[in-house]
């Protein structure tokens, strides 16, 4: 079974990775840390020999598809003076000399990816998994919705209406695609289903009685 974590756990993993590197004698290298390329977070560290700058980058990739809102990726990229287009890294300490550390340059020495499972728009309450089977599960989820006509393009944004479903099919859907804690879902636990539309795409919210959290799909 896939192991799920939350956003705070990914933040902790990022901090732990930075701490591990600094414990090996690396120090923060500010001259290349200006600018932003849309990453969630970044810090640059220089190795004890003063020859390579390592960027520890946390990225939020919103291009990730079905069944997942996005993915979070920690990457460590190493760049030399040649990658940074300067004669040596000491040159970057000179007044007025600064260089942007391009995230897609250099050598990737570490990568960890978490897939965000759809739980609404609040990333702090979203669940993430490193399970590589998630893409196949997400595809199956999309195909299931098409096959059972769960997609609908009617309605307007902020028009939240009650959606009607075959309860037996809905229970099977929740058990198969709800994730951890939903595998034993019973019909009496489902309070109802609401739908809303944004940009022509309809989303469904499943409300539960009891302790189960709301599901969005």
Image: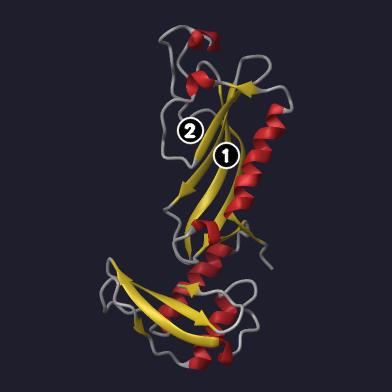
Residue 6 location, quadrant: bottom right
Q: Quadrant of the C terminus?
A: bottom left
Q: Quadrant of the N terminus?
A: bottom right
Please, is residue 62 above or below residue 93 in the view? below
* Residue at figure coordinates x 27%, y 69% from the top left: 200
SS assignment at label 2: loop
Above or below, comparing residue 2 to residue 63 in the picture? below
| Side (left or right) of 93 relative to 131 | left
Q: Is residue 208 left or right of residue 131?
A: left
What x and y, as percent, mark residue 198? 30, 68
Q: Position of residue 52 (x, y in %)?
A: 60, 20
Find residue 48 and report its horizontal and vertical position in percent.
68, 17
Q: Is residue 173 visible?
A: yes
Question: Which residue is the site of mark 1?
Answer: 75
Taking the spot 55% from the left edge, 75% from the top edge, the residue there is 177
SS of the residue under disc 1: strand
Rendered residue at 56%/84% (across/down): 209
**Marks 2 and 1: in contact by CB < 8 Å?**
yes
Q: Residues within 10 Å of mark 2 (few under 14, many from 20)?
A: many
Q: Quadrant of residue 95?
A: top left
Instruction: Specify few, some or many for label 1: CA neighbours under 10 Å numbering under 14, 14-19, or 20 or more.
Output: many
The residue where tag 2 is placed is 103
131 relative position to 162: left or right? right
- Name the quadrant containing residue 125: bottom right
Residue nearer the viewer, 79 or 4: 4
Q: Is residue 83 visible?
A: no
């Amino acid at each position: 079974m896939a192991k799920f974590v939350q956003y705070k756990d990914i933040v902790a993993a990022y901090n732990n990775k930075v701490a591990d590197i600094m414990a090996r004698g690396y120090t923060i290298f500010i001259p290349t840390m200006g600018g932003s390329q849309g990453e969630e977070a970044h810090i640059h560290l220089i190795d004890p020999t003063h020859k390579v700058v390592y960027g520890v980058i946390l990225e939020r990739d919103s291009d990730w598809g079905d069944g997942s809102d996005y993915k979070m990726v920690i990457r460590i990229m190493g760049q030399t003076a040649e990658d940074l287009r300067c004669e040596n890294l000491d040159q970057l300490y000179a007044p007025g000399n600064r260089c942007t550390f391009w995230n897609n340059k250099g050598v990737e020495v570490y990568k960890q990816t978490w897939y965000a499972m759809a739980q609404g728009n609040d990333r702090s309450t979203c669940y993430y998994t490193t399970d590589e089977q998630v893409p196949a599960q997400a595809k199956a989820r999309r195909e299931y919705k098409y096959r059972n006509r769960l997609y609908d393009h009617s309605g307007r944004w902020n028009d939240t209406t009650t959606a009607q479903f075959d309860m037996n099919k809905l229970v099977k859907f929740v058990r198969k695609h709800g994730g951890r804690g939903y595998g034993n879902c019973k019909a009496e636990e489902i309070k109802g289903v609401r739908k809303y539309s944004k940009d022509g795409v309809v989303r469904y919210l499943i409300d539960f009685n009891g302790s189960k959290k709301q599901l969005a799909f």
